[in-house]
Structure formats: C-alpha cells, structure tokens
Amino acid sequence: MTDPAAPDRANNENQSTESKGRLRTTLAPLKPLLPYALRYKPVIAMALAALTVAAGATLTLPLAVRGMIDHGFSADSASAVNAYFGAMIAVAATLALASATRYYFVMILGERVVADLRDDLFKHLAGLDASFYDTARTGELLSRLTADTTHLKAAFGSSASVALRNLFMFLGAVVMMIATSSKLAGLVLLAIPVIVAPLILSGRGVRTRSRHAQDMLAQASAYAGESLSAVRTMQANGAQPSTVARFRQAVETAYDAAQKATLLRAFVTAAAILVVFSSIVAVLWLGAQDVLAGRMSSGLLSQFVLYAVLAASSLGELSQVWTEVSAAAGAAGRIAEILAVEPKIVAPAQPTPAPARWQGRIAFEHVRFAYPTAPDKVALSDLTFTVAPGERVAIVGPSGAGKSTIFALLLRFYDVDSGAISLDGVDVRALDPRDLRRAIAIAPQEPAVFGLSVADNIAYGREASPRDAIVAAAKPAQAHDFIMALPQGYDTMLGERGATLSGGQRQRLAIARAILADAPVLLLDEATSALDAENEAAVQAALHDVMSGRTSIVIAHRLATVLEADRIIVLDDGRVVEEGNHASLIAAGGLYARLAKLQFDTARAGAAS
C-alpha cells in the first residue's frame, strides 16, 4: 500500500535540504575567517566557560520562582521565601560577573580577529601588482579595509556574543521546558521549524541587499577620496557645488540601498517575534487549562512560563543576530574577493641570488609589451637596446612613445609579453622583485610625499638609515637649506602628499631619497622639471656627481637636460628610431633634430619676449 504521509515527509525533507543549503550559502563567506578566531583558543574557552555559567545562573531563576509560588507567601513560609530571595541575589551576582566576563572575552576576540584581518588585507593589497591598481579605486579599497571589516567586528564581537548567549539560553530553556512539562514543551517545539525556516530562507536576500548597500557606500567613499585629494583643483575650477551634488547623490544611493536592506531585516525580525510569542501564548493557554483542571500546580506553570519566555526571547534575539550575520557575510564576501586576487608579479620558486654588488648592465632584447588595460595598443614593439655599466643614457621622444613604460618594466611592475629584460645578464623575472628593486633608485617626475616627517620621507624604504646619512643625501639634492628653514627641521611633519611643499621641494626630497638609496642603477624621470633655473643648475650638478660610477637612465622631456648624456636613445611609437649623442643626432636631421629645433626655438622666443 502507498503511505499517504509519504508526500508530506518528502516535502518536509526537501524543505529541510533547501534550508540547509541556504544556511551553508549564507555562512560560506564567513568560513575563511574562522582560522583567525581559532588562533585564540584560550580566549574562546574563557568566553564559553563564562557563557555556560551565565546561562546556568539565568536558568535557575525560574526554579526559585516556582518554589516561592508553590510555598505561598504566608508567615509560616517566611524563612523559605527569604532563602529563595537570598539565593536569587547570589544567582544575580553570579550572572552579572559571568556576563561581564563573557562580554569582555568575546569583544576582545572580535577586535583581535578584525585587527589581524585588516593587517593581512593591507599586506595583501601592498603586494598586488600595478595591473591591479590600474583599474582599482583606492576609495573602494579603503572602504573594504575599514567599513567592511567593521561589519565583521560586529559579527565576531557583539553579534557573536549575543548569538552564543541566546543559543545557550534557548537550548537550556528547551531542556528545562521538557523537564517541566513534556506535553507543553512538545507543542512549543513544533512551532520552531515554522520560525527558523523563514530566517534561513531570507538570509540570502539580506546578504545580497547588505552587500549592495556596502558597494554603494564604497563608491561614495571612493568619490569623496578622489575629490578631497584634488581639493585645490576642485576649488580652482569652481567645482564645489557640482562635486558636493555628485557626492550627495552617491550618499543618497547608498542610503536607499541600506534602507531596503534594513527594511527586509526589520520585517524578518518582526515576523519571527510574532510567530514566537503567538505560539507561546497558545501553549500557555493550554497550560492554564491544566492548572484549572488540577493537573499542574501554579508554580510549575509559572516555571514553564518563564522558561518559555526565555526560549522565545532568545529565539527572537537569534533572528535579529541572523540578519546581522547575513549582512556581515556580504562584507566578508567583498573582502574575500580581494584576498582571492593573486599578484601576477611574484618571486620565482627558486630566485636567482642577487650579487653583493650589481655592475649595472641593462639589456632590453626584442621586448614587446601592451598594458593589461589596453591589450590591443602596443606600448613597446621589438624594443632592443643595452646600457653598459656606469653609462649615462637619455631616453627622449614624443609623449606616448614608451619612455615611462621602460622604467615600469625595468622595475618589474609588469612582465613583458615577449622578449626579455636583464640586469647583469640575469633575466629580471628570475629575480626576487625585492632584490631587483633594491638595485634600482628612482626619482620620478611626480614624486610621492607622505604624511610623515621630512627625515622619514627621505628614508622611505630605508628606515634604518642614520640621521647623518639622511642629511648627507639631502645636501647634494639641494634640499638641506629649505628643510632647516622648516619649524622642526628634519622632524617637521608634512601634510598629506606634501601639500605644504612646493613642487620643487617635493622633487628635491625625491632626489634625496634616490641618493640615500645608493643603488647601482639610477632612474631619473625628468627629475628637475619642477625646479627653477637656479636650483635646476645646482641639482643637475649634484646629480652629475651622483650618477658618476652608476648606470643612469634619464627620461628627458626637456632636451636641455640630456646634452651631457653619453648616449641618447630616441623612441617613437614604442621603437628605437635613432641613437647617438646630441651632435650626431642633430646632424642626422631626424626626429631628435626636429624635437630639439622645436624646443630650442620656443626657448629663444620665450627669452626674447
């Protein structure tokens, strides 16, 4: 015969399987974070011990209430009542101490987990290659590093504390309800699947909406970061109203997304509380009938009522925590996406050891390269040239010819598509990138200055350098005099991006940084372009001494800076089109001669005016 209950059982099993699948889906983004928590097992053990004591203390209170009610409040029972109240005070003191202990250990666990996660996340971001940052927005990354990890702190801190406390309370209350009245407890437990299933089913929706809200907030943060980093440009162009309006729109979009996520969480919480307490009221009505019929004492019903209320309130709190955990899972998913990004530029499994001192011979052999963001546009095509140890080579050419790309490849910010780049005959891909970059010092055209002291900026990357060495590097860079004029000299704290310094001062700090590096290879990307004529002449003289004995490559936009180069390489459209010294290239009448004529004629016209 066919079992008439079989379809219902099959349907229940399917629903159970679906709920378990949704539960795993919702919690899956949080799984990679568990190792962070498991590093601190003693803290977890202390929290669980305190939690157990607190839950036990709470669950003894209904027993005292039952005893008082059943004994009655008469003169004959005064001593028993006093004993019960005394016991309740002792229980309350135990509960308070255990709760405080549990809160402390759970909260510091959350803080510790998030601190470790932020540290690992920033370390991972610092190790990602240039191709990642070609498309990533710094503001969004900072949002994940701060706002998203704060969501996780709540999940591992306060939410975890509330969840564990209420889970213990719920399980303990259920056990005590069964011990008090198995019939009434059975009716209460029948309602639990009706309560829990919607919570699990709604988890995915909460997670999706919360993640969308976090994405919108990250975009608003990114726009704010970009705008504030260029605040002078914004103000100079009178763009404050439009910038503020765009940010307001981004904030409102983030608010709308957060409002929708919160609305869903509020609805789920309300539904859970309604179902929980409605089921409790129904069961208590049945219990009242047993009291009236003499099948149960008033004290026993009161005990069951208190346990039922504890179970219901704990389940209601768990429903709210579940929505918070679902939101945290969205933040964890965003962080996991970054941690899953593998850097493309890494050290080989067995890197070639760096020599004690590089000679500085550089060779580009049939190099072809296109930036990952523009794979169809070739930046360098069949580029071949060599630089001998100690040689000074200038690279010139029109904008977009590939000059800066040569520096990026030599520093191995990217790998070539084909061909090879070598330093002293060793392919740069066979080296640990850190060893390679320690052999190269660079003074870029747009130097980075950080919100650190002047001395820390010069010693950036070489923090162990003594003050004497820092001063010795600043003097030939023509930076010492202006540094000493600052309020605290070398200890003066600079504003973000060196906003309080002139362009020439920032460039001189970058040159001092390159001098301090004392590397065998020196790269200069029009390093004196922001200097006035007097300081440029002084710094050029200093660089002349610094370049002595070092392999030096100079990217020159102003041809006046390359006249003393041993050799000039002329690039156009990613290829070497001319090579020689200034006199021979002028005589050849090619691209270099045209560029030189244009610049020198412009300079003469400017001088005449």
Image (cartoon, rainbow, N blue to C red):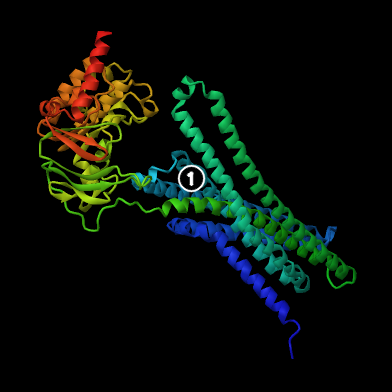
Secondary structure beneath label 1 = helix
Dot 1 crowding, Cα within 10 Å, few <14, some 14–19, many 20+: many
Quadrant of the image for the C terminus? top left
Residue plotted at (52% across, 43% down) = 147
Q: Quadrant of residue 388?
A: top left
Q: Is residue 475 visible?
A: no
Q: Is residue 540 left or right of residue 47?
A: left
* Residue at x 64% of width, y 71% of height: 16
Q: Left or right: where does residue 400 sit relative to residue 61?
A: left
- Residue 378 drawn at (x, y percent): 30, 44
Residue placed most toward the observer, 401 or 255: 401
Q: Position of residue 344 (x, y in %)?
A: 33, 52
Asked if residue 190 is positioned above or below residue 529 in the image, the reply reads below
The residue labelled by disc 1 is 144
What percent of the width, then of the height, locates residue 590? 18, 30
Q: Residue furthest right?
A: 292
What residue appears at the point 27 percent right and 18 percent down from the top-left corner?
482
Amino acid type, label 1? Arg
